[in-house]
Amino acid sequence: LREKVMRMINDALFLGGKGIWEVDEWSIGGHSMGCFVAITAVAQEMSSTIKKVVLYGTGSYPGKTYADCPPLRDAAGVNVLVINGSEDLIVTSTLFGGPEKDKTFQENMPPLLPANTPACSDRGYTMLKRIDGGNHAGCAAYGPHTFPLADGVRTITLEEQQKMTVKLSADFLLGC
């Protein structure tokens, strides 16, 4: 069923139903709470098709109150890129982050890719990237983030943060 759904999406988006072009591997991404959706989709069902996940503005794993999400670490060959801004006060808050949530995140995600290691592995890894001067709202294009708590103040321009985000994402998605 999963493969049929992915092929239907492929046909609808790219071929207008002609069914000629096939995609063997997909990628998925999410920002903030959308990261929970992406993680849950891959961990529960889609790991045979989705092999790369990009997460923007997150530092916690979906809790049991959100979804019954098995460890993404158990999904074979899934590589994850996590991009956070240094001024992101949402991710570092005790509401959405903090030492206990960091520990749970690392326990459930694929293993961290050691520094200076080429990101060409089909064994599954998590790569953490930080954009110095970036904040939570800068992962998207909406105004100041104030709910459920205030975001940090970006010390680079929105354009600078988004250019860095796009470069990091493209390098990861298009790399080996």
Image (cartoon, rainbow, N blue to C red):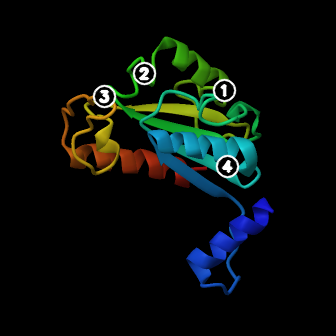
Q: Earlier in the sequence, mark 2 or mark 4?
A: 4
Q: Which residue is mark 3?
A: 149
Q: Which mark is residue 51?
A: 4
Q: Which residue is mark 1?
A: 108
Disc 4: CA contacts within 10 A as few (<14), some (14-19) or many (>=20): many
Q: Secondary structure at mark 4?
A: strand
CA gap, disc 1 to disc 2?
Answer: 19 Å
Q: Is residue 117 left or right of residue 59?
A: right
Q: Is residue 4 above or below residue 67?
A: below
Q: Which of the two discs, 2 and 4, sits closer to the camera?
A: 2
Q: Which of the two discs, 1 and 2, sits closer to the camera?
A: 2
Q: Earlier in the sequence, mark 3 or mark 2?
A: 2
Q: Which of the two discs, 3 and 4, sits closer to the camera?
A: 3
Q: Which of the two discs, 4 and 1, sits closer to the camera?
A: 1
**Residue 57 at what x, y percent from top left?**
41, 36
The answer to whether mark 4 and mark 1 are in CB contact below 8 A is no
Q: In which quadrant of the rendered view does residue 86 lie? A: top left
Query: Which kind of residue does numbered mark 1 sit on?
Result: Asn
Query: Which kind of residue does numbered mark 3 sit on?
Result: Leu
Q: Which residue is mark 2?
A: 95
Q: Is residue 126 above or below residue 37?
A: above
Query: Which kind of residue does numbered mark 4 sit on?
Result: Lys
The answer to whether mark 3 and mark 2 are in CB contact below 8 A is yes
